[in-house]
């Protein structure tokens, strides 16, 4: 009798004047599913918004759509232990203040898997949500908006211990991790967006095996610590303001075994303010970048070992020569190195030294960057090397340059 009254109440609510009558409300089916149960709706389109406040599983089998009607968040999860898979969630609201999203999670141990989320402002919003699994989802934002006023594909806010794995994300604004720690971001594909990933006050995160391409910029780390950036492919970041990896005032950052290709700037990093601020940059491939690495500040001190610098326009530059000279360069492969290896140990017999000649012109006068590689600036560089008017400054030195690229 109680169940019958509840059904009648919900049906009556859905038939109130002004509400859409064409689509059945999925909220009704959620209300009738007991805690711990599984809801498998019939294939079709259902009306949102939907709120889940008990541990259930919703399995759409790839044939169920929830239409938010262009208002608010399409699906809100408030209970721990919820699983949502195989759904198509579409048409959220457009309020940045309200953070209108495809899915909002305010719970722990939630699984979001194999969902398509499109025509939404924000994709997935984790707010004070811990130990959740976000896997194999496809996320798209509002294609008719400028990229700067779209929503974030995934927004992780004060949420810890989450795994974000193997998602395909396109045409969104950013992926933002704010005050979020111990998250694992693995094997995702992100393209045609603004900032691929941004970590702000977010320590102890792992970023591994992701493909980031054709975005404005790649991975940005600000005021964070112990970020492990490993085995990612970061390519085609061609905007002048973008870079493959940017690190600012963060420490214990490991940048290892990444491929950074065809970017305006491959790696942009500030000098360490304290000894623990140094970066460990090892076993990376920097190739076909305008500027492979740029260091800002005056102290230097980063550990840069066993990397490959191949076919870049400029390999290393900084805001001042001490910035780059005081880094620890060792065992890197430089395609411009022309020394010999008479003892056959695989290491050049002479250090690889790079001096500052005509580069100082476009370093000190940003407008002169337009002429990099031109005949005129090449002639200036040739004359400075042939008859230097003053002793050039040393930019950097690798005491053990490799003769062949490391594997």
Image (cartoon, grey):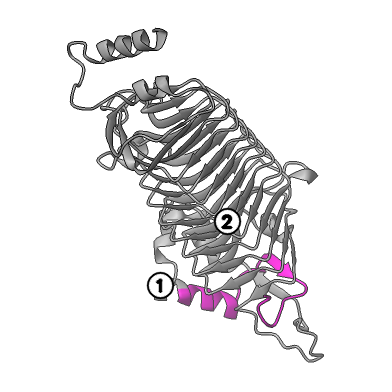
Label 2 – label 1 distance at C-alpha: 24 Å
Looking at the image, residue 94 sits to the left or right of residue 225; the answer is left
Secondary element type, mark 1: loop
The quarter of the image holding the N terminus is: top left
The residue under the point 26% across, 26% down is 24
Q: Position of residue 55 (x, y in %)?
A: 53, 26
The residue under the point 75% across, 82% down is 348
Q: Position of residue 54 (x, y in %)?
A: 51, 22
Please say if 113 is above or below 255: above
Neighbourhood count class around disc 2 (C-alpha, 10 Å): few under 14, some 14–19, many 20 upward: many
Neighbourhood count class around disc 1 (C-alpha, 10 Å): few under 14, some 14–19, many 20 upward: few
Is residue 239 in the magenta section?
no
**Residue 266 placement: quadrant:** bottom right
The quarter of the image holding the C terminus is: bottom right
The circle on residue 374 is 1
Give the residue number, with chain letter if any, for mark 2: 267
The residue under the point 69% across, 65% down is 396
Q: Which residues are magenta?
A: 378-407
Which residue of the protein is positioned furthest toward the front in this rendering?
A: 1
Q: Position of residue 208 (x, y in %)?
A: 61, 54
Looking at the image, residue 349 sits to the left or right of residue 245; the answer is right
* Residue in front for this viewpoint, 4 or 260: 4
Please say if 309 is above or below 180: below
* Residue in front for this viewpoint, 336 or 135: 135
**Residue 7 placement: quadrant:** top left
Is residue 389 in the magenta section?
yes
- Judge depth for marks 2 and 1 and give the one in front: 2
């Amino acid at each position: 009798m109680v169940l019958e009254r509840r059904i009648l109440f919900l049906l009556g609510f859905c038939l109130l004047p002004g509400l859409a009558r064409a689509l059945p409300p999925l909220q009704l089916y959620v209300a009738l599913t007991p805690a711990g149960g599984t809801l498998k709706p019939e294939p079709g389109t259902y009306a949102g918004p939907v709120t889940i406040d008990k541990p259930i599983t919703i399995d759409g089998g790839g044939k169920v759509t929830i239409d938010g009607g262009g208002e608010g968040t399409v699906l809100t999860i408030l209970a721990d232990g919820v699983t949502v898979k195989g759904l198509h969630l579409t048409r959220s609201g457009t309020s940045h203040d309200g953070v209108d999203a495809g899915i909002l999670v305010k719970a722990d141990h939630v699984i979001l898997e194999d969902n398509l989320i499109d025509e939404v402002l924000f994709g997935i919003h984790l707010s004070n949500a811990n130990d959740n699994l976000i896997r194999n989802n496809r996320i798209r934002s509002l294609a008719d908006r400028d990229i700067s006023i779209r929503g974030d594909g995934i927004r992780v806010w004060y949420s810890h211990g989450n795994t974000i794995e193997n998602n395909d994300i396109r045409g969104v604004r950013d992926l933002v991790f704010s005050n979020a720690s111990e998250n694992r971001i693995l094997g995702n594909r992100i393209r045609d967006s603004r900032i691929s990933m941004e970590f702000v006050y977010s320590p102890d995160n792992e970023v591994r095996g992701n493909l980031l391409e054709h975005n404005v910029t790649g991975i940005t780390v600000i005021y964070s610590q112990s970020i492990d950036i490993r085995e990612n492919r970061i390519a085609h970041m061609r905007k002048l303001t973008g870079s493959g990896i940017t690190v600012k005032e963060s420490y214990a950052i490991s940048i290892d075994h990444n491929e950074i290709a065809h970017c305006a700037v491959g790696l942009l990093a500030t000098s360490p303010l304290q000894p623990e601020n140094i970066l460990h940059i090892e076993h990376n491939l920097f190739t076909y970048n305008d500027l492979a690495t740029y260091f800002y500040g005056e102290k230097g001190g980063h550990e840069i070992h066993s990397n490959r610098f191949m076919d870049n326009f400029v390999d290393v530059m900084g805001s001042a020569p001490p910035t780059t000279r005081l880094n620890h360069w060792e065992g890197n492969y430089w395609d411009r190195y022309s020394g010999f290896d008479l003892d056959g140990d695989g290491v050049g017999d002479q250090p690889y030294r790079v001096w500052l000649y005509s580069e100082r012109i476009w370093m000190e006068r940003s407008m002169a960057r337009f002429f990099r590689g031109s005949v005129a600036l090449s002639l200036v560089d040739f004359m400075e090397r042939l008859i230097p008017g003053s002793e050039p400054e040393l930019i950097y030195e690798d005491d053990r340059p490799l003769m062949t690229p490391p594997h």
